[in-house]
Image (cartoon, grey):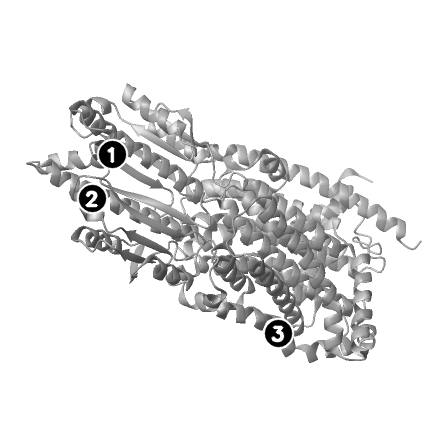
Amino acid sequence: MSIFRKYKEHLADVLYIWRQELMQVIKDEGVLMFLVIVPLGYPLLYSWIYNNETLRETPVAVVDQSRSALSRQFIHDCDATPDVDITYYAADLDEARSLVSRQLVKGIYLIPSDFAARINRGEQATISVYCDMSLMLAYKAVYQTAMIEAGRLGAGINIKRAGNYTKREDLITAQPLAVDDVAMFNPSGGYGSCVLPAVLMLILQQAIALGIGMAAGTARERHRNGQLIPDDDPHYRGAYRIVIGKALCYAMIGFIAAAYLAMAVPKMFSFPQLADARTLLLMLLPYTLASIFFGMTVSCLVRYRENVMLLMVFVSVPLLFLTGVSWPQSSIPGYWQGVSWLFPSTFGVRAFVRVNSMGASFSQILPEIRILWIHVAAYLALACLVYRYQFRLARRYAPA
Amino acid sequence: MKYITSIFHIALRELGILRRNRIYGFCMIAFPTLLVLFFTTMLDEGLPQDLPIGVVDHDNSTVSRGLVRTLDAMQTSRVTYHFASVTEARAAMQEGTVYAYLYIPQGTAAKLLSGRRPKVSYYYTMTCLTAGSMASKDLKTITTLGSAAVGQAVLSAKGATPRQIKAALQPVAISAHMIGNPYGSYNYSLTTVFVPGILMLFMALLSAYALGTEMKFDTGKEWLERAHGNIVVAIIGKYLVHAVIFLLVIFLYLFYIFNVLHFPHQGGVWNIVRLTLLQVLASLGFGIFAFGLMPSLRMSMSISSLWSVLSISMCGSAFPVAGMDTPLQAMSWLFPLRHYWMIYQATVLNGFPVLDVWLHLVALIAFTLLPWMVIRKVKNAMLHYVYIP
């Protein structure tokens, strides 16, 4: 047999398996659900949930025991900020506490009776802030607003005391060192803009892995011996052809899903999008491939189709944590960092966040890209190994 | 009496199923254990410590070095890089090596001392909200201190007492009381949502799975026969075992976080027990309902898992429900985890009376009773449907 005929035969097998796999995917509604509906619908739902980005007008109760012009000014100033809304005036702390208990307010400002008197005597006055700690975002809004407004009130008092002549002198009295506070890449500090890019990439990996796992489960259940690889089809005669043929099928779907998740969804909801097309392509290519081979490797480990669902759903929240988006990467303990190296999502998410939200160039995400290509190679090799094992199993149990 | 013995027999039968199918062992014991260990070790620091921060110090004076030293000494920040230029610092931020950088231009100290109001800037990335806001908090503090340092020197030279200096620099001070979580620990606030949330996911998934496999392996008829055809008895017997095992697992988790790790809680034991009971029953109810709605193993599991994963966002513990669009605020009532969390934070974390969140309590009871609506359909499915892979 000439070498050309041999390769032509290989190619024909690969193409045949590609088609077979595609037919199976289309026929199986469980697989379609995870490969099409989840990547299509889930990102939209998540984007909608986080679309408002920030929490505005957190309700706060005030206990004003001072009842002075200064205390009222502080209350007005806080009420005028976008983050805090003074919704209740309580007579005492107990009443305010019951407002928190009834979920009507998220914090209490207590202005003591000697507040104005202390300031007028030139002493330091204290405002107590009581925060409901159940919501971190609400706590930050309640506490930081009080800090900023107390600082501003103090600066105003200092300016009055200084008896300056010019505006410039007032400015120097209030703040001798000017400060520029610049939040970058997500200037409003929006929750969605922060979490969503990571969620999008994670959805890609999870959907691919779930889809492949479900398809493999179906193949096993249809098979009379519960094997993954059909033993009555002459085209399925080598692990490499099967892996490549199946991967081609999932790549078709995976690349479209990747393009949709990385480009269309952020556009629809106006999340930050600084990515350069070429860099994005060079990043999504290894990530999608790595996810596919990862999914194929995992799919060989599970016997029933439902089990892959239990497994992948279970790991999705921990995986999001391991990417370093909700909990900083520098604070992840070393052993969990080690575990995170096993999953393409860790690097896919990091690379995507940097390219998409921070406008990083290709050279800046090179370390992640390298690891993703290593994942592609490693999981391809692993997928071939486990498929070869499955292949042998199928042969062994095949009727003579 | 007949019913009680048949409940007992069905429970024994279920115990056998749980022992034979390894998936139950994984989802009831192994995964929850891993999960608890994952979150409690991951968030062990409580607050992120020693976040890497860069400095661009073009002034290189005693004042600027003092600022940098103070920054380095803060608990949450560590100065890991000194960059030559702002461009370099920004590139490092894009590469993910630093979360923030402080820029001190040339002549800052000289201008500060001569009262010409110099300007320093700091930049932080908000692509990781926790890191960005912690870093900005520290940077804000040290730049404020830098401002205050001048005034302090002048005042003490004039002979003011420390108390006078304090009052002059900060006429209005804030004393913060972080009720229920005095350290602002993320471990206390995240672990207590994610672990119960994912456990509820397992409970819902497994209860759908348990019914689905009866159909898949065609054992449903036998199961109903043992209950003398009474589906209520059959369901109670089956899920009694699930409920008891999950209750034990959750109580162990609660014992671990409250008694070993000493998470704060003000509600007392009775509030915790009541909430746990409702949590388990509502999740099982939800799973059975999902199966009754679509009596197919695959569909009911998909629905339960997609719904439960969504509930982790919809419960509003990270991004509050009050900040979502109004239709979503209404929809949040359809997620058991939302009610669990509302009751948890009110009664357990803050120790408020349960009457103030009674509607959520009712909602969890409603989830427990949901199977009632589909119970005939479940029976019908068991008797007549054929499993198609």
**Secondary structure state at the residue bearing disc 1:** helix
Q: How many marks?
A: 3
Q: Which element carries disc 2, helix, strand or loop?
A: helix
* Disc 2: host chain: A
The residue that mark 3 highlights is B369
Q: Are marks 2 and 3 in contact (CB under 8 Å)?
A: no
**Mark 1 falls within which chain?**
B
- On whether disc 3 and disc 1 are found on a single subunit, the reply is yes
State which quadrant residue B244 falls in.
bottom right
Q: In the rendered image, which residue does mark 1 sit on?
A: B166
The amino acid on which the numbered mark 3 sits, given as a three-letter code, is Leu
Q: Nearer the viewer, residue B194 or A252?
A: B194
What residue lies at 81% left-to-right and 72% top-to-bottom? B223
Instruction: Judge left or right: residue A214 versus residue B88.
Output: right
Q: Residues within 10 Å of mark 1 (few under 14, many from 20)?
A: some
Q: Residue A118: which disc?
A: 2
Q: Please state the horizontal and vertical placement of residue A211, each as a whole percent of the image.
A: 65, 56
Residue A324: image x %, image y %? 51, 41
State the separation of the CA atoms marked 3 and 1.
61 Å
Q: Quadrant of residue B110?
A: top left
Q: Nearer the viewer, residue B49 or A211?
A: B49
* Mark with earlier residue (3, 1): 1
In this rendering, which labeled residue sits more in front, label 2 or label 3? Answer: 2
